[in-house]
Amino acid sequence: MRELTKEDKLFYLGRSFFTLDGLWMILTEEESNWEIALKIDTIVWIRLLKTIFRRLKRYLGIKSSTLQDLLQILTFRWTIEGWNYEIIKNELNEIIVEVKTCPYKAAMERNPERHDKIPLICRDMCMPFYKEIVHEFNPDININRDQFQGLGDPLCHFKFSAQGKLNLSTEELEVRELTLEDKLFYFEHHFLTLDGLWMVETENELGFDKALKIDILVWQKLYQIIFRRLIKYLKIQEKNLQNLMEILIFCFTAEGYEYKVIKNDSEEAILLVTLCPYMAGMDRNPERHDKMESICKDMCVPFFLPAIEEYNSNIKLVRKRFIGAGDEICDFHFILNEK
């Protein structure tokens, strides 16, 4: 089995981050309605951005909360997520960010069924949560927005101002060049956080049973998409059991599982998980302890089934042990049943 590189992990987590968020939004809407899904999405992203701000302040060694600090954090996030923007200082002592491409709007434009939702997302979600996170970062920083691509304007404008004169040079407004490690830090730390926030906020709004159902659907569809991506990325030609293990190990390694492969041949494979990052996250939160067994058994078992069925319907997965239910390991036992 190949050892994953940083480029491999970034490919996996960077692509999956946006897909995961989109699936949660779409499937929550299908299981409830647009208004509820948008409400949950807004809460999730307000909480996520506040978490991102805290983590990036530590990561970047930022000790204050100036406008320059705010711009450093925002541009770090925007650059990594693929925003295309320009920073300008005008004669009114304002910092203007002109956004030419928003990756979230671009993703919705690629899906004809979501075109009518673009202005709603822009008006009801993007507008309020930037205002809230900027105010929390520093209430003396003002943000004004008067152009929105989602509402038909050619650009999105973010106008920032603060009390006192801004003595920022052109060099200080330049965005630092981000490294592979920067990008990997961002997605490694926020992929699991994004999923956890969607689960918690959906449960708060719709109840645990409905949230669990949506979570299962999200991850079933996500792994189907991931398997298709990895088949291309790994240049897999034959959909046999050993290549399935290569895909699964790629997934587990990128997501932060610890595991050992006990058997891996053409007819049978056994993988034992010794640490599950999702159970570890719940274990750190006492309020989620009573949900661990249900999530582990009811959710994790069906996660992979549609993806495996699509990959090769002759491969069967058997599960008997679960960390969330008190076992020391989770077992993944694959058997090839040739018809």
Image (cartoon, rainbow, N blue to C red):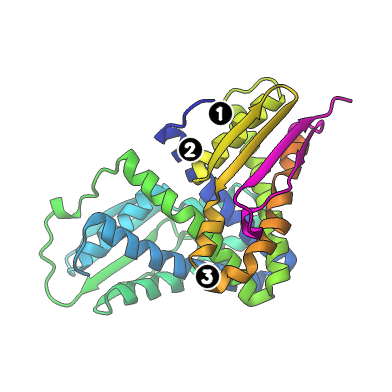
**Three-letter amino acid code of the residue under disc 3:** Thr
Residue tagged 1: 233
Residue tagged 3: 42
Q: Is residue 139 above or below residue 85?
A: below
Is residue 46 toward the left or the right of residue 142 in the image? right
Near mark 1 (Cα within 10 A), the count class, few <14, some 14-19 or many ≥20, is few
Distance from disc 1 to disc 2, alpha carbons, whole Å, reads: 9 Å
How far from the left and from the top, in percent, is residue 268? Answer: 73, 28
- Residue located 73% across and 48% down the image: 320
- Residue located 66% across and 30% down the image: 244
C-beta proximity under 8 Å, tags 1 and 2: yes
**Three-letter amino acid code of the residue under disc 1:** Tyr
Of the image marks 2 and 3, the number of the one nearer the N terminus: 2
Q: Nearer the viewer, mark 3 or mark 1?
A: 1
Near mark 2 (Cα within 10 A), the count class, few <14, some 14-19 or many ≥20, is some
Depth check: give the residue in front, 229 or 166: 229
Q: Is residue 292 above or below residue 82?
A: below
Q: Secondary structure at mark 3?
A: helix
Residue 312 colored magenta?
yes
Q: Which residues are magenta?
A: 311-339
Residue tagged 2: 11
Q: Secondary structure at mark 1?
A: helix
Depth check: give the residue in front, 272 or 120: 272
